Image (tube, grey):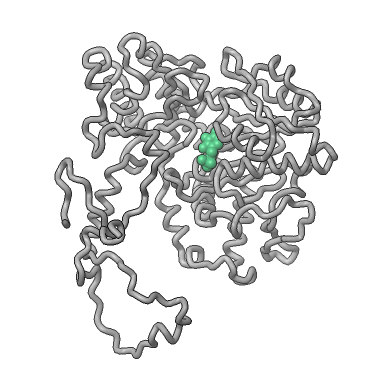
Amino acid sequence: MAGFPLKGETTPTIFEKSESGRCGTSMTRTDVDTVPLSDLVPGRHLRSEPARLPEVPENEVVRHYTELSLKNHHVDRALYPLGSCTMKYNPKVNEATCRLGGFAGLHPFTPQASAQGALRLMYELAEMLKEIAGMDEVTLQPAAGAQGEMTGVLLMRAYHDANGEGTTRRRILFPDSAHGTNPATAAMAGFDAEEIPSNASGRVDLDALRENLDETVAGLMLTNPNTLGVFESDILEISRLVHEVGGLMYMDGANLNALMGVTRPGDMGYDIVHFNLHKTFSTPHGGGGPGSGPVGVKKHLAAYLPVPKVVRRDDGSYGLDWDRPESFGKLHGFYGNFGVMVRAYTYMRMLGCRGIRETAEAAVLNNAYLTVLLQDDFDLPYGRGMHESVFSGTSLKKRTDIKTMDVAKRLLDYGFHAPTVYFPLNVPEALMTEPTETETKEELERYAAAMKAIAGEAETDPEMVATAPHTTPVRRLDEGRAARQLDLKWSFPEDAEA
Ligand SMILES: *Cc1c(COP(=O)(O)O)cnc(C)c1O
């Protein structure tokens, strides 16, 4: 079953391509005496039968995975304007550094004295994040944004517990534009998650906030620029109000693309912030792969951060400090996803201070340009955002019956990934578009031309748009089923029948 599948055929798995006796490489026989494996590995750890590995020549392996990689859209193919997710291009130098033997081959139990380079990298990465966010301490442990949020909310709990208010401060507030992980995290940590409405400009409604604030509030979780891409220009007043009743300010900093090098959450009154290294700091993400969600805090919360903390000792060496009696404990196996940290560190060192600011400026400029190109064809209920803008397909739907989901699917035929659709929840038919700083003017224009063409097709050939995509390996998927009934494991036919 080797070879490229014809249209309509499903691609065989690498196991189905296997032919007994085929081999990827041919090496000369060694003339060194080898020790039998059973002398090296205790018998109980040895397989009774050889592993059933696919036997495929090297060129077929490369073709197989290249073909699979082209079945999906990814940022190495074209623009991927998935708002809030920051699908910026991942520089390949990041991959080169994280594969350096000293990093990639380092065992997490390596004695600290032999892991100085890795510890130093983690220490310096945390220092850079502190500076960017205006925070006093940073932990690198959380493995994703959502786990960073969990860390932040556990810090809130530890802080209020220490002040004897752990049982009375039960409420965490968030605006109706918030990312779904905010209320989910608050609820998982045992708090009451309470939504407050946005005003007509898409910002936190200060009156609604005031009405909801009292001594039962543990904190406010607020993204800035918020999930509509709109900067919360009342942020100093919001922070003052929350602090006045003894609450804490949590910034969902998953996406710092508009801010970094320009302004800092710490200066806006936030007490806690999480970063998504896999968004702002260019490491690859999607499909559940490894991420990193470091958390920065102000001094009054530092004692509760998870153990261990990476420290620089007086003699200039680096180490892990477990002696933090007020810490809420350990959060993640070992110290987090180290490979992701190496990538983010590389990205930040490549950019330098000025480059980081220019990145933010370019992200905002790219979005401004793209927004202007599209604003005549799609509604823009809350106006142009900073690094992302939330369009709406409401008028298009009224005119043509073509929904945002149809536009998203049709974009695939033009070779682009769709923007984030139907989020944030407070925008009907939402198309949340984030071009990122890495795209050229021409690529933005190509994307805008595709969007305009689709708006035209919605008028002239709505049936074709409503049944898109037409050129992809699979047509419209049942997305609910695809997400809920995953079938990720291939079985040998003889096992499946048994
Ligand atoms: C992506 C995102 C998160 C969650 O981050 P994960 O790493 O996917 O867990 C939280 N908040 C916002 C605003 C985000 O964009």
252 or 94: nearer the eye?
A: 252
- Residue pushed farthest front? 498
305 or 181: nearer the eye?
A: 181
Q: Position of residue 151 (x, y in %)?
A: 65, 44
Judge left or right: residue 156 versus residue 109.
right
Q: Quadrant of residue 415?
A: top left
> Is residue 256 visible to the viewer in this orientation of the structure?
no
- The residue that appears at 58% across and 54% down in the rendered structure is 336
Q: Position of residue 434 (x, y in %)?
A: 44, 30
298 or 127: nearer the eye?
A: 298
Q: Position of residue 265 (x, y in %)?
A: 65, 34
Give the quarter of the figure containing the C terminus. Answer: bottom left
Q: Position of residue 432 (x, y in %)?
A: 45, 26
Is 418 rendered above or below residue 23? Answer: above
Judge left or right: residue 184 versus residue 319.
left
Give the quarter of the figure containing the N terminus. Answer: bottom left
380 or 44: nearer the eye?
A: 44
Is 77 rendered above or below residue 313? Answer: above
Is 40 rendered above or below residue 54? Answer: below
- The residue that appears at 40% across and 33% down in the rendered structure is 480
Q: Quadrant of residue 15?
A: bottom left
- The residue that appears at 67% across and 21% down in the rendered structure is 234
> Is residue 186 visible to the viewer in this orientation of the structure?
yes
- Residue pushed farthest top? 399
Is 304 rendered above or below residue 197? Answer: below
